Image (spheres, rainbow, N blue to C red):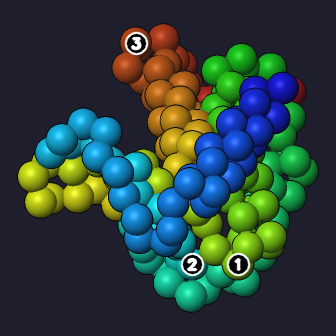
Amino acid sequence: MLSTVIVVLDQVTKHAVRYSFRPGESTVVVPSFFDLTYVRNTGAVWGSFQHQNEWLAVVSVAVLALIALFYHHLVGGRKLFALAFAFIMGGIIGNLIDRVKLGWVTDFLDFYLNTSHWPAFNIADSGICIGVGLYLLASLWPVITGKYSAKPASHK
């Protein structure tokens, strides 16, 4: 359900940006901090792997397949892990739709301080980052809280 919400929100906001702006066009939301800027990204995070859209689509499908295949092993009934993968899958699917449909990913959230810009991103990217962060937090939580067993489980 959460994955679906992320995909829908991602696609609706991207459509609104493509309808309202020309590529490269921007509008100031919070001066010297945040703009809405229409960017066509044919690469991955932070503009890496530009013009590799087809390979990135293949990688996206492969990651989704691996998550589906190993979901129960990765989540193991733990709710925070399930939440993390919902964010990750929603984000991957949102960007994959753009890659397949348009040949690029629509980015538009443009944060900056004066002239130092964080690369533009979108709702799907946010979902992936939140999901990865939750997964890392859930993975490290037993170590952080000291509630883990240092002894390996016995095999009978």
Classed neighbour count for the residue bearing mark 3: other residues with Cα under 10 Å, few (<14), some (14–19), many (≥20): few
Looking at the image, which residue is at 50% across and 84% down? 50
Using the image, tell me which numbered label, if any, was put on residue 42: 2
109 left or right of 29? Answer: right
Is residue 18 positioned above or below 36 on the image? Answer: below
Q: Residues within 10 Å of mark 2 (few under 14, many from 20)?
A: many
- Real-space Cα distance between discs 2 and 3? 41 Å
Q: Is residue 71 left or right of residue 146?
A: right
Identify the residue at image location x=38%, y=20%: 144
Q: Residue at x 80, y 70 (%)?
A: 101
Q: Which residue is under mark 1?
A: 103
Q: Residue at x 49, y 71 (%)?
A: 23
Q: Is residue 156 left or right of residue 47?
A: right
* Percent of width and height locating residue 30: 24, 36
Q: Percent position (x, y) of residue 46? A: 39, 66
Q: Quadrant location of residue 71?
A: top right
